Image (spheres, rainbow, N blue to C red):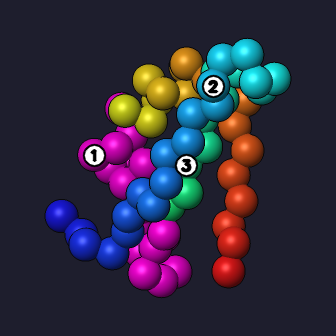
């Protein structure tokens, strides 16, 4: 298991505040190689099945890479 990424924040909007049922996560990676390794795990590795199941539950996904 790699030790170069962390979920920093997990935010869930409260029902009745407008944008209900929205989840925001903020994840940090040590470097570009750590991000690439995680993408590989999601695309073809041990996280692929979980990622597929989670994608089936989503209505929309927006991702941004901040530097």
Of mark 2 and mark 3, the one earlier in the sequence is 2
Q: CA distance from mark 1 to mark 3?
A: 20 Å
Front residue of 21 and 39 = 21
Q: Look at mark 2 in the image and give the residue it sits on.
A: 14
Question: Disc 1 vs disc 3: which is toward the camera?
Answer: 3
Q: Secondary structure at mark 1?
A: loop
Mark nearer the viewer, 2 or 1: 2
- Where on the picture, by quarter, is residue 65? bottom right
Residue beneath the point at 37% across and 54% down: 41
Are circles 1 and 3 on residues that touch, CB within 8 Å?
A: no
Task: Check disc 2: other Cα within 10 Å, few if <14, some if 14-19, many if 20+.
Answer: few
**Residue at the location (48% across, 83% down)?**
31
Please tell me whether residue 51 is drawn above or below residue 46 in the rendered image. above
Task: Give the quarter of the image for residue 49.
Answer: top left
Which numbered tag is attached to residue 46? 1
According to the picture, the residue beneath numbered tag 3 turns out to be 25
* In this picture, residue 62 sits left or right of residue 51: right
Residue drawn 18% across the image and 64% down it: 1
Along the line of sight, which residue is nearer the eye, 19 or 63?
19
Residue 23: give x, y in percent of width and height. 60, 35
* Camera-side residue of 36 and 22: 22
- How many C-alpha atoms fall within 10 Å of the one at disc 1: few (<14), some, or many (≥20)? few
Chain part drawn in magenta: 28-49
Question: Residue 50 appears at what percent x and percent y?
Answer: 37, 32
| Residues at marks 2 and 3 touching, judged by CB atoms closer than 8 Å | no
Establish if 52 lies above or below 63: above
Q: Is residue 60 magenta?
A: no
Quadrant that contains the C terminus? bottom right
Q: Can I make out residue 40 in this image?
A: no
Identify the residue at the far left of this view: 1
């Amino acid at each position: 298991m790699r030790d170069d990424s962390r979920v920093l924040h997990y935010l869930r909007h409260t029902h009745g505040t407008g944008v209900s049922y929205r989840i925001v996560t903020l994840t940090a990676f040590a470097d570009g190689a750590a991000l690439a390794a995680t993408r590989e795990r999601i695309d073809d590795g041990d996280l692929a099945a979980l990622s597929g199941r989670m994608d089936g539950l989503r209505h929309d996904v927006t991702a941004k890479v901040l530097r």
